[in-house]
Image (cartoon, rainbow, N blue to C red):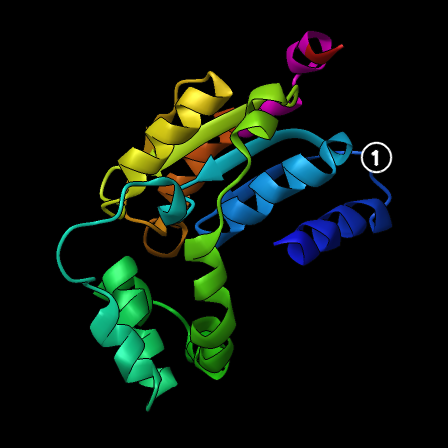
Amino acid sequence: MAAHADDAAALIRACGFSEAVVFGTSGGGEFALELLARDPGVVRGAIIHEPPLLAVLPPAEGPNPLQPIFQLAQTDPGAALEVFMRVNTSDAAWEGLDPATRQRWVATAVNLFGREIPQFVSYAPDPEVLRALQVPVVLLRSRDGLPFGGAVQSWLEAKLGVTGGVLSGNHAPYLEIPEVFAEELRPFLHSLWSEETTAARS
């Protein structure tokens, strides 16, 4: 997480910006949270959407519904990635991707299951760091998102002292309903970049 956060901060500065409004979804939401902890000066505002912060929640009872996918990844990571995407988004979202994008994602499956997912599910931001943040943060989850979305958002709301919102669609609405997603996200982006937000921080 630290490396991803540092890369994001370096990219913002390399693009010639002193600060940026950051949007992070799913694992990217965890990158954004770590960026806020490590280098908040480059973040003018942050939008966090359905980060998989399973480590902050009580252990789930019963079998892990994703375990069959992780087992499949041991022998056929490409097939496992397709199943993982269909389960975490929808059949339509996966099938709507252009073939080149699907092939590129399949090619990264070994890294996803071997390195990235274990980091995602074990990551937990420091509650004290979250409570001390001065950067405005918007918390969002999807109406038809993943089962943990509401519980994770509630945990973050308590630490950040904000009330989250709800977007249309599933865990990845930008894949299935990109126009709706863009329209719903735009007001939050405008608000975080507004003069009012800047004045509130100074």
Look at the image and tell me in which quarter the N terminus lies.
Answer: bottom right
In this rendering, would 173 be left or right of 145?
right
Quadrant location of residue 96? bottom left
Quadrant location of residue 131? top right
Look at the image and tell me in which quarter the C terminus lies.
Answer: top right
| Residue 94 picture location, percent across and down | 31, 68
In the rendered view, would you say 78 is above or below 122? Answer: below
In the rendered view, would you say 31 is above or below 104? Answer: above
Is residue 91 at all visible to an observer of this figure?
Answer: yes
In the rendered view, would you say 33 is above or below 202? Answer: below
In the rendered view, would you say 152 is above or below 2? Answer: above
Residue closest to the eye, 170 or 59: 59
Is residue 100 at all visible to an observer of this figure?
Answer: no
**Residue under the point 52% across and 34% down:** 47
| Residue 152 picture location, percent across and down | 35, 37
Q: Which residues are magenta?
A: 189-200
| Residue 72 picture location, percent across and down | 27, 83
The residue identified by callout 1 is 18
Q: Main secondary structure of the magenta part?
A: helix
